[in-house]
Amino acid sequence: MKKNIQRWIPAAVVPVVIATAAIAVPAVANASPSLPEKTPQQLLELVADSAGTPFSGTIEQSSALGLPDVSSFAPSGGGDSASSALELITGSHTANVFVGGATTQRVQLLEGFAERDAIRNGDDVWLYDSDAKEATHVTGTAPGDLPDSPAITPSEAAAKLLASIAPSTAVEVVDTAKVAGRAAYELRLAPNDANTLVDSVVLSVDAETGLPLAVTVSAKGQSDPAFSVKFSKISFDTPDASLFEFTPASDVTVETETLETLESLEGQAPDVAATATPKPTVVGDGWDAVAVIPAGTRLTDPLLDQLTTKVDGGRVLETSLVSVLLADDGRVLVGAVTPQTLQAVANQ
């Protein structure tokens, strides 16, 4: 598999890390807008109804997970799957996002004068690295079979976090705010679970469309937000259809992949949502759920040796919000829980 696709479909830890990661919003200088009162249930319904809303905008992501910024570790235009995965959840990143509908999306991750693009148009996906001058064309038999784009937008993060709501979660509307010039409600989720590392989550919900404009996840025992993504600007005009078309320049090296090819590549780690095997299982539910990815995904990046600690049964990557256990038997366990919880699940 080409190294540029590895940076967009990274090691198996990434989808779960993003799904459980905390996303926080810096304070805004604007006065809180006056909005009609809404109950938490009304806001949750508003968020659900926003699915499929077309938009375009710029998002900003930053993190404070207790990991170093590894962007300098990965060579320009590529890198091993683990360093690519960690690069997306450390440091700061800016991306342009365009959503025309359920099967038309484009994400441009900006890196200085270079960019990485993930473009989906129907049943075609293009992954493009301008610095490496490489592109991968991924085709599938049906739109639902294609890999998802990286879950880096507030709406994607909110959907995954809302899926973690358990009966013990306290849900309340705490304030209003201005995000990207839009009036928004702030919905706070506070898990009452001793096993999770998540202290609270705040969703900034657009008052008109219900689209999440920003998400905050704070970790227990940490004053600063653990991970943040927000729109700095947004438009709800439908993006032009030409944005979802891609024609590589003559000096770009192109590789064509089918989903069957991606699934059969031994030693690579495609997004678990896009593969038939191995499929993860989930132990528990709610905030302390643990995803167990079966043996078969090789994580051999030397960077992991520097960032993980040897424990009984494997090696642990521990952050303020997410723990990852690379078990000796080849399994990968991930959750917003303590390493001890992962070890206990691994021993079941």
Image (cartoon, grey):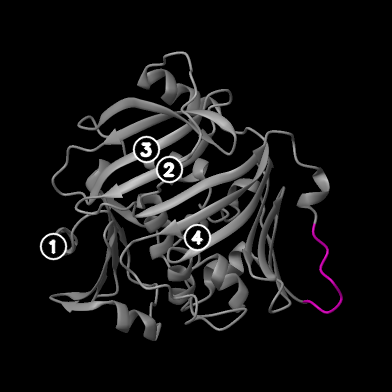
Rendered-image quadrant of the C terminus: bottom left
Chief secondary structure of the magenta portion: loop
Say which label, 3 or 2, has the lower sequence index: 2
Q: CA distance from mark 3 to mark 2?
A: 12 Å
Amino acid at the residue labelled 3: Val
Q: CA distance from mark 1 to mark 2?
A: 34 Å
Residue annotated with mark 3: 202
Discs 3/4, front: 3
Q: Nearer the viewer, mark 1 or mark 2?
A: 2
Q: Is 75 in the magenta?
A: no
Q: Earlier along the polypeptide chain: callout 3 or callout 1?
A: 3
Q: Position of residue 261 (x, y in %)?
A: 60, 70
Neighbourhood count class around disc 2 (C-alpha, 10 Å): few under 14, some 14–19, many 20 upward: few
Which residue was labeled with disc 4? 275
Disc 4 marks a residue whose amino acid type is Thr
Given the image, on which type of amino acid does mark 1 rest?
Answer: Gln
Which disc is residue 27 wearing?
Answer: 2
The residue range painted magenta reads 246-252
User: Mark 2 or mark 4: which is in front?
Assistant: 2
Q: Disc 2 residue type?
A: Ala
Q: CA distance from mark 3 to mark 4?
A: 32 Å
Residue, x 39% and y 54% (percent of image)? 227
Q: According to the image, label 1 marks what residue?
A: 340
In the picture, residue 175 is in which quadrant?
top left
User: Residue 232, image x and y in percent?
Assistant: 58, 46
Does dot 2 land on a helix, a strand or a loop? loop
Callout 3: helix, strand or loop? Answer: strand
